[in-house]
Image (tube, helix red, strand yellow):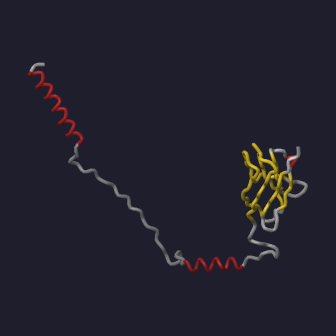
Amino acid sequence: MTKEYCRAFGFIIGAGSIFFLVSCGPSDKEEERKIIQVAQAEESQADTITQQQIEDLAIYSLDEIQMGGDFSFSTQKMVTFDLRFSEIQNVAQISIYMYTGEDGSASKDLLERGVIYNSARYRGMLTVPSYVDSLLVVKDGALSDAIEVAIDQNNRLQFTFEEWL
């Protein structure tokens, strides 16, 4: 390369760099920033209510409620279930159902479904309505072989599947 060529190349690079730096730098003109002011809601004496007034109104409203003699706020209960097998199950699907509706229009609602592998036990907890006294336990999806198991007074459901050869 010749000396003149190197100078020309250096001048072009230098001028381009300066042009780039000048174009990216801060501008002398300040942009006007728009400030949006939000009007605050006006509070009047009629609109303000204290926490004590809210609590007094709630207590007054609850005092007016008339409950039936057998009504209870405990509408659900936790049921602990423990299902055992007389032999270890390689793969077994367990389903737990609940009857709903009247006898004429009864339907089965699935509450729990699980699969056990190389085990002789399946256990857990379910939330059921407090009026439920028993649940249906189904092994391997055979609804025709469903077993109705009673829930005891301690909200436990226990059953042992016996295997016949």
Q: Residue at x 77, y 51 (%)?
A: 110
Outermost residue, top direction?
A: 1
Q: Say left or right for 42 vs 95.
A: left
Q: Nearer the viewer, residue 146 or 102?
A: 146
Between residues 79 and 109, which one lies in front from this camera angle? 79
Which quadrant, please, contains the C terminus?
top right
Could one spot residue 68 in this view of the protein?
Answer: yes
The vertical placement of 74 against 127, above or below, is below
Residue 115 in sight in this render:
no
Identity of the residue furthest to the left in this view: 3
Q: Position of residue 149 (x, y in %)?
A: 84, 58
Tell me residue 138's x, y (percent).
82, 49
Q: Residue at x 81, y 56 (%)?
A: 98
Against 158, residue 115 (above or below) is above
Q: Quadrant of the N terminus?
A: top left
Q: Is residue 148 left or right of residue 55?
A: right
Question: Considering depth in this image, is 21 or 32 the residue closer to the camera?
Answer: 21
> To which quarter of the image does residue 34 belong?
bottom left
To which quarter of the image does residue 25 belong? top left
Q: Residue at x 19, y 32 (%)?
A: 16
